[in-house]
Every structure is written in C-alpha cells, then in structure tokens.
Image (cartoon, rainbow, N blue to C red):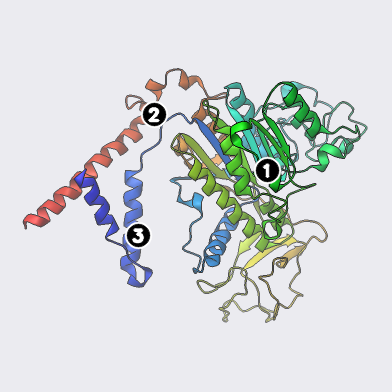
Amino acid sequence: MRCLVLTFLISAAFALSEDDGKTYWMEQAQQTLRNAILQRHNMKVAKNVILLLGDGMGVSTVTAARIYKGQKAGQTGEETQLNFEKWPHVALSKTYNTDRQVPDSAGTATAYLCGAKANYATLGVDSRVARADCSNIGDTDTHTTSILDWSLAAGKSVGLVTTARVTHATPGAGYAHTPERNWETDKDIPDSCPGVKDIAYQLLKDNADIHVMLGGGRREFYNRKDGRKLPEEWLADKQEKGLLAKYVQNATAFRAVSAADTDYLLGLFAESHMTYELSRDNSEEPSLSEMTRKAIEILQKNNKGFFLLVEGGRIDHGHHDNYAKRALEETVAFDDAVAVAMEMTGDNTLLVVTADHSHVFNIAGYASRGNNILGLVDKVDEVQKTVDNMPYTTLVYANGPGPGREQNLTGVDTTADDYRFQRLVPFQPEWETHGGEDVGIYATGPMSHLFHGVHEQNYIAHVMAYASCVGPNNKHCENPEDEYSCSGATAVVNCAVVVHMIIIPMIVCLLVKNMHTM
C-alpha cells in the first residue's frame, strides 16, 4: 500500500504547466502512458447500459465543441476535454446505409440499436425493405428487434430520452417497424399503405412496456386522422393496471415527479422538437441533463438493471441549418448529460457515446491558438490569403442554406446565436447534408474494451448485448466464472494488466529505495 501511495505521489509531483516547454509535454505523455499500462479491463457483466447518442456529432463537431466548451470557461480551449473523451476505450464506426454512402439517422439507428444495417430512411426493418415501400412490411421476418426488446425480455427496465421528437428516427428504431421514418402519425401514411401503423401508435400502443419516454413530439400523438389522444389512453391503461405512471407536458410538472412513486413516465415537452439549448425556456422545458437524471432515478429501481438511450438530437439540426454555434452548444449540453450518467452509475454500467453520422462541417485555416472558434481566422498571410481578399471563419460547411463567399464578413458578428456559417454548395432552402466519414465510439465500464478498432456500426448493438447478457449474446452468461476468469483465453490480456499493476509499483519502490541508499 505504501508503494502504491508513493507511486501516486511521484506522479503528482510533476504538476507542470505548458510554460515549462518540452518538460511538460514529455511528462504529460509519460503519465498518459503509465495510465494506459495500468489500465485493467472491466470483465464484469454490465447490469446497466446507457447509450448516449450525439445525433450528427462527427469528429469535427467533437473537436470544435471541445474548444467551444473550454473557451466558454475562459481557457484557450484546445486543451479542454469533453467528459467522454476521458474514457479509456475509443473506436470508429462505419456509418453507411446498405443503399447509401452517406447515411440518414433512421438506417443508422437501426444498425446500432438492432444490430443489422438497413436502408436509408427505414426504421426497425432489414435491408429487404426499401424506403416508403410497404409491400412487404407485413412480413415480420423483415422486422428487427432492438436492444430495448432484448433488455425487456431479460427483465430489465428501459427508457429513451431525446431533445428531438420521441417519434423521430433515433428513438424510433428502438421500437418501430416502418419503411418510412416520416410516418410519425397516421396522417403521414399514404392511402396506398392501408393497415401500416404510424410510429406514434407503435410507441404507446405496441410498446407500452417502455418505462421512460421523454422528449418532444406532442403533435404526433394528438394531430391524428383517427382522432385518438394516445397519451391519455396510455395513462388510463397504466392506471387500470394499478401501475405507477405519470404523463407530464412541462418542466414544472416534470420536476415535481418523484422517482420513488413512478415506474412509468411519459414526458412530451414540445409540439415538435424541443427548443435549442441557447433559446430554451427553463420553466417550460427541462434540460437534457435533467431528463437523463430523472430517467436513471426511475430505471435504477429495477434490481435487474436497465437500458437507457439518451439522444442529443438537436446537434444535427443546428448543423443542417448551418447554425454552428447552436450545434456546438447542443454538444456541450449533451456532454453535461454524459456527466450526469457518469455521476449516477458505477463500474457495473457500460457507458457508450457515439454518433449516428457526421456532417459536412470542418475546421480550417491557421488561426492562433485560443482564437474564438466561432470567429474569423486571425492569422492571414500569403500562404492562406483568399483570392477575394475577404476574411473568413474557422468553421465552414461544404453545403447548406448559409451564405456563400458573396458575403463580406468584415464587421459581421459570426458569434451570434443565429449566424449561419458560410457554405460552398448552396442548398437553400434545403438543409445541409450529412457527412459520410466514420464517427467515434467512446466507452467505459464492463466490456468497453470490445470497442477496439474500426467497426461496422451494427457491431455496437452486439457489444451492448454481450456486455449486459441480453438478446443474441447471452450464452457466455450461463457460466460466467469460466468466461471472466484468468483461466480463459479471452482474459489473458486482462490478467497481464493485473500483473503490471503489481510489478510496476514494486519497481518504483525499488528505484526509490536504491536512490535513498546511494
């Protein structure tokens, strides 16, 4: 124990700043290396799994949000870390749909929630179902099941939290089966597809066993051809069965909900998507962090554990409108929800952060370190001088509704909440498109080391299932002593790390002892 304490003190002694030049960077890297060597894989069964999905949160968005977060705190920004960037395991996800190089949020959600890649704009069905083609939607063999289904079958509680509509693409893949993501209410379904169920109906009628549903999209449950009021029907059904259920529509009612006497919670806080964080009325809509906290409080009452999906849905929308500041503010708010998940769970919970896709959003120029990430590039020399001799921003889009280079940015406040950043290809009045590059997977907790390289996106669902012993990956749980012990081949690396955790402190002690006797 004394040696371990000594090792910590030796590490803590190197509290250097960047002003120390190469000494700082050498020790910073050495400390990171020591941490990596001492890292031990968590081989436990995950009692809980929380998937935190930043919609549209590509690598460039993560980088820009990191800088934005730091600059909001008065730092230069580049050295800042988002909470999930501190986690030990990082991989990449290949996001293409089975029929598109650049994906949408429906086909991708089907991949990471259901374990099978799918076509563009389809939800909860495999690649045999094409977009808006209802000819074979009645064939249940084409339907996929999700990590929500698998967790419920194992006796766990499940929930979904989003700042988008609860019937939108990301949450929809967890419970719906439809060839068209936009069929959110029965008014959206064409007459040529009789008998097809809309997404709102499927959520509250076919998936009434989901314990927590929080987000926007109230209109999809009321503005209906059939005239039904689905939330009231959902609540009445729960009350008739003697279940502890609540339905809330604003932040005040939401904050009054006690997890102790609530097992089922439906919260619909906006007619469509919830308000951007920069404009959110705190008295009307709870934050993503608040919704995450309440969901965990309710779900964790189940001693068998839970699965929770948390979506920062409006990162995507900010980018689509070329509102870079709004997208970055949404990303920081999403990171705050990550912090809540970390605070409220322990080493029995697998936490995964990823994105469904990226955007055509980039960081360019050679601005000075600490230059406002939303501002104009401040270092312009002959190498990077523009042909039109006009200033330009660090952040830029390849396409979208924003202005082009015809806009002279001299005197323009590019840090304003609703400033649309410049783009190359004009798409007005349409949205900017998604990007097709890989996105990050960040993980910590049981079996998080299984995210280890470049993966197909559907792999994410299989890791979550394996870690929590649900769905198609529960065979190993029948005899966990063999699977997770040092006698198994799968645990060789883990056992080697344990040895390192013993050997390295001993070496440090010996070195210190020798120095003392010299």
Compared across the picture, whether 49 is left or right of 24 comes to right
Residue 133, position in %: x, y?
83, 33
Q: Nearer the viewer, residue 474 or 358?
A: 474
Q: Residue at x 62, y 59 (%)?
A: 328
Is tag 2's residue or tag 3's residue first in the polypeptide sequence?
3
Amino acid on which disc 2 is placed:
Thr
Residue 494, position in %: x, y?
35, 35
Q: Is residue 367 visible?
A: yes
Q: Residues within 10 Å of mark 2 (few under 14, many from 20)?
A: some
The numbered dot on residue 28 is 3
Q: Residue at x 75, y 39 (%)?
A: 167
Gap between marks 2 and 1 measured at Cα: 45 Å
Q: Residues within 10 Å of mark 3 (few under 14, many from 20)?
A: some
The residue under label 2 is 490
Amino acid on which disc 1 is placed:
Phe
453 up-or-down from 306: above or below: below
Q: Nearer the viewer, mark 2 or mark 3?
A: 3
SS at mark 1 in the image: helix
